[in-house]
Image (cartoon, coloured by chain):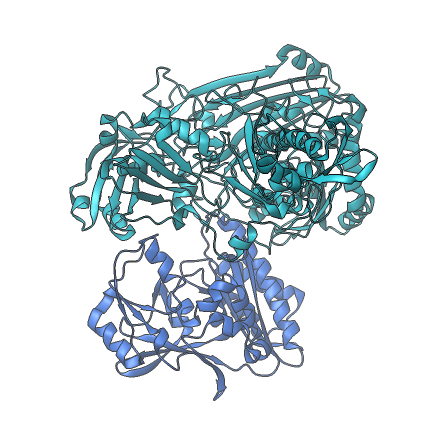
Chain colours: A blue, B cyan
């Protein structure tokens, strides 16, 4: 549990951090909450030559509603998301998600930016952001660019971020009235990665017809998966027990789990089906509140 | 009956707050890794990535070039000193550092010593070992196959068979089972699990080149035994070895064996003349140190149609890994597994065990149990449930029918034990009442009608602890007595030293409570010291719930020796004869004249200032206690579970634990022990397994995969007690630390099987994970 030696750098501004990234290239890693990176370094699975600690850059941690978006700074701690009234009241799916990430000690340090940028398919926020149709703000030498979340996850531990870009903000469109969402996770014990988890976000009209729906899935494939077939099926339909059951079946079909110590692939597919049903039902309940 | 002392004295029965907790809570404990010595250096082991491979070459040149590296020790270096192998605690030997080949993944191959931990870790990575892979043997069921690779080329016997052990009457049992009209059979694997103490193993070895003395700070549950073994194996005179077990962060049997890392640190300190610290990582602890269980068991019961049991037959295959590093009494290759007839009157029984080698980490240690008692208890309690299903009778009713009744104690079991005392029905009645058993069964019936899954599991265990009587029990020849030395200071305060070693059990509180009970000295006035072999009397240590039954007896007897001397001094002070004195905790008084009294404090002062003519000064005593028998705690546990059909998740709704451990020293500590053991049992039943893939790679080698339950997973433990004192123990106590780990796995499993029994399910192997439950539900058409 002793990492190889590395250089530690502590920039005070985003441009300074970016120039350090440019200077040290692929051998540099951003240190945010460090709750994934540091353990990987201790196991000597990750061996960055330079750690660029962004924790001392001001104004990277915030939660605010602005211009039709929920904006969350990349350095915002999970514990702050968990305790935010704004998120609890308007984005319950996000509250659900933060609440089941690891354990309270980890959440005190872990950041939402790190959770997404680490691109571990077992992380919880990616599924929720896929369900919410979020955008990622990447800041580099030439300023900011917006990456839709659907394009963000490239492969395991790899995102659309360039090596000299920093994830500085996440933007979530404020859902229209009649919306609700929920995240359901099965884990072997508290603090574990998901055996499988599903985030669902739905918007209903007065007749219970689905105007919009997003479904994201955790740890059932090499990258976080958006259940496109299930979403396509539900849009425009009245949400009934039958349509929800069919959507859940389709979501299980969209999942690509593999067998491991958390269970066989077949079980994980069954979990996706069950959790999709539970998440949509809770989302509908919340939409109607 | 135990005489009640005042709260100020705080004798037996008082929930005295734990004296040791103040320093633990304030972070002022002193664990091995807190030991810092001048000039201290650090060791790190290089371990094998393969489960079975020949070592072609080890190149240490690059490692030696790392700045700060002082030594790189290999098996060949140790072989020159005759230390490449060491004896295990059970008639086998084990490689310290591999020579020739490696036999399990994570086996110790080389030891790097450096000025700091960072240099040691960097250099360990640069030790180049060339391996040639050999066929791997993972499944113990194939260990004895004709084409199985022979793992232990060092042994004369060219076979992977370690031992065969049997007890009981084979033929009579066979006949009784054949003639029984009702038969029940269960194949149950008690999976390989690990005690996983929160503090891993480690040591600081400090050889003083000037004095020739070796001091070893060690995570040891048995410091004296370890000192003797270091002397016997290493050839250092025993008076020149001092083992100190400082604060220990949990042991559960994991800290009984001697590990290669200890030996390497000692060798390195002898070589360098500097203190060498070696501390395991979590993964090293889980992957290489003493595992527990791995018993592959079959039980068959023959019974009459009315449910009366007639015979029990048990056959077991024991996987010991690459070396038989079980730590258990010499005459018991399968520990006290023959307690498997449990709480029931079996007229006939037979039990046999075969031990085999595989390419896995060595061990077979007693994880919070007296040597294989957990396995035995789990098996019989599972088998009784299977019999209940065969008979279509209630599992609680079946147990009540077959319990050994109180009037039959002391009870001789067909497998050779003499149970000291018991009242099994009383414990079960109390548990059934606390649970509201009848209402629960009604609720279950209602739920089944609605397609919901709820289960109730019962386990009525009998433990065997307190090893043990010297006629039968020894470890590597050393008899399993234990000891206590008490010195009363002139001011009436005291220090006591014992041969045991607390790892969290609360000895600094409970042993002074025994002395307080016997002598009336307030518990606050008594200091307790353990773990330093230079000062404590010789003892065999703390495991197998033996501290209270054995060292507790020694404490009581040493106190009584002091009391006898105190009586003489009191008679002298009061100018009466000894026969005219009466004792109550804290003072002697003249019969019929209670105001004419001398307190123990008065007497202590007189022992140094005003003695009767001819009496030796001082007030102290030492006692080595050899128990006449073991003690047999028992209890009934009831578990209630609900199963989520959609996900297979199991929710433990309630858990009722009624324990009978005889007379209780500290009720609060007993309750804490029970909570801890039940939580471990929950982890074993639902979460824990050290598994290996077909290449012998460890799968559960870190806390991401080897799961420890948290407060979130644990239910509210509902505890209760009955009290059946041990008739042969000086204070009637039996020991309790292990009962909850021994008794609870069967309760959890029985509850889950009960929830699914109407679907025809009779057994599920642990750990019962959600996916296993889901697969069963799918098979039975209950899940999609």
Farthest residue, direction bottom: A67
Left or right, residue B455 beside residue B250: right
On the image, the x and y values in percent for residue A260 come to 46, 48
On the image, the x and y values in percent for residue B509 come to 60, 45
Q: Residue at x 24, y 32 (%)?
A: B55
On the image, the x and y values in percent for residue B783 come to 63, 50
Q: Is residue B104 visible?
A: yes
Viewer-proximal residue, B405 or B479?
Answer: B479
On the image, the x and y values in percent for residue B659 come to 71, 39
The quarter holding residue B745 reads top right
Q: Residue at x 57, y 83 (%)?
A: A176
Q: Residue at x 54, y 50 (%)?
A: A267
The quarter holding residue B699 reads top left
Viewer-proximal residue, B578 or B477?
Answer: B578
Farthest residue, direction top: B171
Viewer-proximal residue, B630 or B634?
Answer: B630
* Image quarter hosting the N terminus of chain B: top right
Q: How many marks?
A: 0
Viewer-proximal residue, B336 or B567?
Answer: B567
The quarter holding residue B220 reads top left
From this view, report whether residue B384 is shown above or below residue A212.
above
Q: Is residue B654 visible?
A: no
């Amino acid at each position: 549990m002793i990492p190889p030696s590395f250089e530690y750098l502590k920039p005070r501004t985003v441009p300074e951090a970016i120039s350090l990234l440019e200077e040290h290239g692929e051998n540099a890693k951003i240190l945010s909450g460090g709750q994934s990176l540091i353990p990987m370094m201790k196991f000597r699975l990750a061996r960055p030559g330079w750690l660029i600690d962004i924790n001392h850059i001001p104004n990277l941690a915030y939660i605010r509603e602005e211009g039709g978006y929920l904006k969350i700074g990349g350095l915002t701690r999970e514990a702050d998301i968990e305790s935010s009234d704004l998120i609890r009241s308007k984005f319950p799916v996000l509250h659900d998600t933060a609440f089941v990430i690891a354990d309270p000690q980890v959440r005190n340090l872990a950041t939402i930016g790190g959770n997404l940028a680490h691109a571990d398919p077992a992380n919880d926020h990616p599924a929720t952001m896929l369900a919410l149709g979020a955008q990622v703000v990447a800041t580099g030498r030439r300023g900011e660019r917006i990456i839709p979340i659907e394009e963000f996850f490239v492969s395991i531990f790899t995102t659309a971020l360039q090596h000299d870009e920093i994830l500085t903000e996440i933007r979530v469109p404020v859902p229209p009235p009649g919306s609700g969402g929920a995240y359901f996770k099965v884990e072997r014990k508290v603090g574990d990665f998901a055996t499988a988890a599903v985030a669902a976000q739905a918007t209903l009209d007065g007749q219970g017809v689905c105007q919009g729906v997003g479904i994201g899935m955790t740890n059932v494939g090499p990258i976080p998966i958006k259940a496109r077939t299930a979403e396509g099926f539900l849009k425009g339909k009245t949400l009934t027990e039958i349509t929800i059951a069919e959507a859940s079946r389709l979501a299980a079909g969209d999942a690509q789990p593999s067998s491991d110590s958390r269970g066989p692939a077949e079980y994980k597919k069954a979990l996706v089906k069950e959790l999709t049903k539970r998440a949509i039902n809770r989302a509908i309940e919340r939409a109607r509140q | 009956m135990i005489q009640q002392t005042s709260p100020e004295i705080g004798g037996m029965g008082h929930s005295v707050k734990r004296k040791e907790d103040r320093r633990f809570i304030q972070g002022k404990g002193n664990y091995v890794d807190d030991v810092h010595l001048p000039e201290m250096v650090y060791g790190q082991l290089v371990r094998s990535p393969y489960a079975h491979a020949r070592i072609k070459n080890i190149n240490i040149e690059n490692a030696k070039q790392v700045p700060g590296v002082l030594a790189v020790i290999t098996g060949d270096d140790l072989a020159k000193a005759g230390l490449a192998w060491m004896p295990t605690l059970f008639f086998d030997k084990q490689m310290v550092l591999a020579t020739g080949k490696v036999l399990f993944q994570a086996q110790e191959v080389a030891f790097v010593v450096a000025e700091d931990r960072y240099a040691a870790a960097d250099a360990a990575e640069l030790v180049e070992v060339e391996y040639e892979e050999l066929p791997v043997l993972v499944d113990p069921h194939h260990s004895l196959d004709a084409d199985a690779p022979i793992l232990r080329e060092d042994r004369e016997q060219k076979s992977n068979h370690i031992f065969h052990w049997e007890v009981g009457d084979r033929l009579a049992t066979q006949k009784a089972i054949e003639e029984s009209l009702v038969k029940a059979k269960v194949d149950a694997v008690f999976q390989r699990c690990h005690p996983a103490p929160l503090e891993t193993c480690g040591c600081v070895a400090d050889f003083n080149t000037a004095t020739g003395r070796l001091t070893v700070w060690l995570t040891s549950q048995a410091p004296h035994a370890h000192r003797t073994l270091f002397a016997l194996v290493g050839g250092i005179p025993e008076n020149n070895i001092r083992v100190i077990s400082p604060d220990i962060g949990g042991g559960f049997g994991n800290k009984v064996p001697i590990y290669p890392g200890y030996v390497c640190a000692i060798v390195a300190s002898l070589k360098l003349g500097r203190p060498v610290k070696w501390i395991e990582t979590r993964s090293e602890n889980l992957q290489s140190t003493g595992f527990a269980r791995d018993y592959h068991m079959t039980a068959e019961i023959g019974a009459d149609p009315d449910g009366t049991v007639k015979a029990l037959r048990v056959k077991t295959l024991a996987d010991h890994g690459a070396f038989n590093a079980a730590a258990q009494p010499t005459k018991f290759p399968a520990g006290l597994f023959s307690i498997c007839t449990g709480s029931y009157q079996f007229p006939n029984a037979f039990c046999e065990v075969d031990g085999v080698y595989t390419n896995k980490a060595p061990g077979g240690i007693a994880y919070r149990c007296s040597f294989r008692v957990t396995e035995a208890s789990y098996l019989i309690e599972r088998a009784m449930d299977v019999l209940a299903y065969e008979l279509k009778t209630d599992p609680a009713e079946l147990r009540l029918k077959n319990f050994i009744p109180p009037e039959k104690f002391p009870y001789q079991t067909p497998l050779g034990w003499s149970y000291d005392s018991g009242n099994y029905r009383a414990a079960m009645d109390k548990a059934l009442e606390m649970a509201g058993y009848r209402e629960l069964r009604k609720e279950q019936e209602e739920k089944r009608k609605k397609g919901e899954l709820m289960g109730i599991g019962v386990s009525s265990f009998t433990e065997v602890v307190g090893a043990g009587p010297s006629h039968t029990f020894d470890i590597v020849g050393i008899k399993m007595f234990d000891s206590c030395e008490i010195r009363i200071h002139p001011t009436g305060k005291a220090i006591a030293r014992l041969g045991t070693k607390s790892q969290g059990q609360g000895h600094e509180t409970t042993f002074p409570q025994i002395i307080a009970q016997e002598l009336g000295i307030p518990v606050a006035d008594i200091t307790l010291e353990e773990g330093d072999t230079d000062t404590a009397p010789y003892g065999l240590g703390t495991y197998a719930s033996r501290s209270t039954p054995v060292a507790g007896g020694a404490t009581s007897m040493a106190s009584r020796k002091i009391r006898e001397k105190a009586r003489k001094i009191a008679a002298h002070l009061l100018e009466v004869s000894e026969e005219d004195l009466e004792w109550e905790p804290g003072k002697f008084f003249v019969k019929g004249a209670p105001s004419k009294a001398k307190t123990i404090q008065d007497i202590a002062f007189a022992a140094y200032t005003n003695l009767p003519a001819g009496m030796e000064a001082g007030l102290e005593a030492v006692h080595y206690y050899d128990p006449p028998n073991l003690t047999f705690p028992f209890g009934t546990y009831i578990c209630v579970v609900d199963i989520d059909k959609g996900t297979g998740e199991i929710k433990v709704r309630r858990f009722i634990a009624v324990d009978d451990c005889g007379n209780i020293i500290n009720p609060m500590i007993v309750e804490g022990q029970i909570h801890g053991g039940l939580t471990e049992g929950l982890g074993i039943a639902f979460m824990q397994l050290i598994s290996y893939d077909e290449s012998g790679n460890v799968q559960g080698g870190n806390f991401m995969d080897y799961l420890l339950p948290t407060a979130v997973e644990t239910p509210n433990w509902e505890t209760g007690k009955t009290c059946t004192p041990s008739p042969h123990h000086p204070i009637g106590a039996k020991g309790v630390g292990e009962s909850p780990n021994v008794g609870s796995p069967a309760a959890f499993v029985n509850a889950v099987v009960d929830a699914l029994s109407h679907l025809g399910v009779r057994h599920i192997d642990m750990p019962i994970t959600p996916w296993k439950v889901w697969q069963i539900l799918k098979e039975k058409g209950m899940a999609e």
